[in-house]
Structure formats: structure tokens, C-alpha cells
Image (cartoon, rainbow, N blue to C red):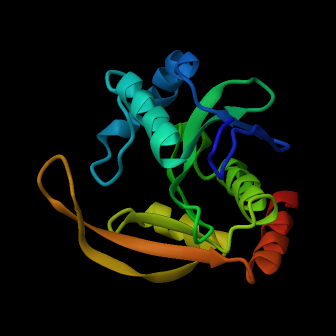
């Protein structure tokens, strides 16, 4: 029996399907990252076609050892893999988690995809897992991500200065946002309004 707080689950919306990530998704992930050559963005960590397999294996190890839950994102009508996301930095004792490691093929950025993915993940976190807080973190220089997180209804908690050292040796300032359980009903209503437009 799986002892983890977060159990594998497939989340289905009107436009996307989130399913537990596995090595069977490797070819689809490789194709998805080519749309926009996302790995070339210096302020985010998206796998390249060459590093995709190692990235999936690391995500699955974190699932096994730390209770994280990685997902692949499919476009519902075509079943095409268009991105990935995960529950990470899981704190089961305090019922907190982060939604992160999110990326989408360039063709699906600034569409309904991100709003619906976050709606599905947040609904599951607050209504099934009884999370008390869900965090989002992003690089200080990732202005698109910061704006997208704010549009969800998350509030900025602060900035972790010199938070992480990147592969290039440069330090990253990390912007932390969160939504707490008491805010979820209003955030949910706002997201549902956006999804109907």
C-alpha cells in the first residue's frame, strides 16, 4: 500500500487531462518541449529532449522518496502531451504543498490551459487532500510566471534572496506566493468565472 498523502490520480477538465507521469510519456515530453525550445529559457528549468529521461526519472524518485506527485498535461481533444506540472515540496504533517515545475508547449501558453490545470490541482489539493495552503514559487526574473500566478488569485508572501544556486553558478531570487484554505472559495469562484469566458 502506498503510504503517501498524495495518491496517484488523473484529473480531467474540459480542455486538459492531468495524468501521473511515467517513463511511457518520454517521447511525448520530448516533442512538447521542442515547441518553443523551452529549455533555452535561462530563468526556468524545463528539460531538453536530451535531458527529458533523466528529468522524468528524478521526478519519479521524488514521488517515491518525498511524496511528490508529477503529472503530464494532455490536451483533451487530441490527447497530445503539451506540458508537465507537479505537487512538490510536500509537507504532509502541516498539510502544505507547492504546485511547481510547470511548463507548457509555447503554442499552449497564454491560453485556458494554465487556468484549468491550476483549477484542477487546487480543487484536488483543498477539497480532497484538505491542504491548508498551496504555494507557488518562481524566479524573480520570470515575469510571465509571476503575472500568471497573481492572476490565479495567489498572494505574494515574499522573496527568498539568494535562494538557490543555478547550474550556471548564478544565484536565484525566488518569489513565493500562496493560496490558503480560507481563501479557496473565492479563488475557486474567480477561476470558474475565468474558465467560462
Q: Residue at x 76, y 75 (%)?
A: 184
Quadrant of the rendering where the N terminus is positioned: top right
Horizontal and vertical percent position of residue 153: 66, 75
Q: Residue at x 48, y 83 (%)?
A: 157
Horizontal and vertical percent position of residue 186: 80, 80
Q: Is residue 118 left or right of residue 41?
A: right
Quadrant of the rendering where the C terminus is positioned: bottom right
Q: Is residue 82 left or right of residue 26?
A: right
Where, by quadrant of the figure, is residue 75 drawn?
Answer: top right
Give the number of callouts: 0
Q: Is residue 148 above or below residue 56?
A: below
Can residue 147 be seen here?
Answer: yes
Horizontal and vertical percent position of residue 162: 21, 71
Can residue 154 be seen here?
Answer: no
Q: Residue at x 62, y 47 (%)?
A: 4
Q: Residue at x 38, y 62 (%)?
A: 142
Horizontal and vertical percent position of residue 60: 49, 33
> Which of 104/6 is in front?
6
Q: Is residue 70 above or below residue 171?
A: above
> Outermost residue toward the left?
169
> Which of 32/35 is in front?
32
Amino acid at each position: 500500500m502506498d503510504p503517501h498523502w498524495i495518491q496517484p490520480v488523473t484529473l480531467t477538465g474540459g480542455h486538459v487531462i492531468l495524468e501521473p507521469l511515467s517513463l511511457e510519456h518520454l517521447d511525448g515530453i520530448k516533442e512538447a518541449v521542442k515547441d518553443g525550445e523551452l529549455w533555452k529559457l535561462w530563468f526556468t528549468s524545463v528539460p531538453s529532449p536530451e535531458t527529458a529521461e533523466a528529468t522524468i526519472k528524478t521526478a519519479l524518485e521524488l514521488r517515491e522518496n518525498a511524496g511528490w506527485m508529477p503529472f503530464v498535461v494532455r490536451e483533451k481533444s487530441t490527447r497530445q502531451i503539451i506540458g508537465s506540472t507537479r505537487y512538490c515540496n510536500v509537507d504532509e504533517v502541516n498539510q502544505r504543498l507547492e504546485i511547481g515545475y510547470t511548463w507548457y508547449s509555447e503554442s499552449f501558453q497564454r491560453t485556458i490551459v494554465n487556468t484549468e490545470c491550476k483549477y484542477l490541482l487546487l480543487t484536488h489539493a483543498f477539497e480532497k487532500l484538505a491542504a491548508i495552503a498551496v504555494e507557488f514559487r518562481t524566479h524573480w526574473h520570470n515575469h510571465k510566471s509571476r503575472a500568471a500566478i497573481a492572476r490565479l488569485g495567489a498572494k505574494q508572501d515574499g522573496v527568498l534572496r539568494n535562494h538557490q544556486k543555478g547550474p550556471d553558478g548564478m544565484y536565484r531570487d525566488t518569489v513565493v506566493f500562496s493560496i490558503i484554505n480560507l481563501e479557496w472559495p473565492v479563488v475557486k469562484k474567480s477561476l470558474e468565472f475565468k474558465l467560462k469566458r
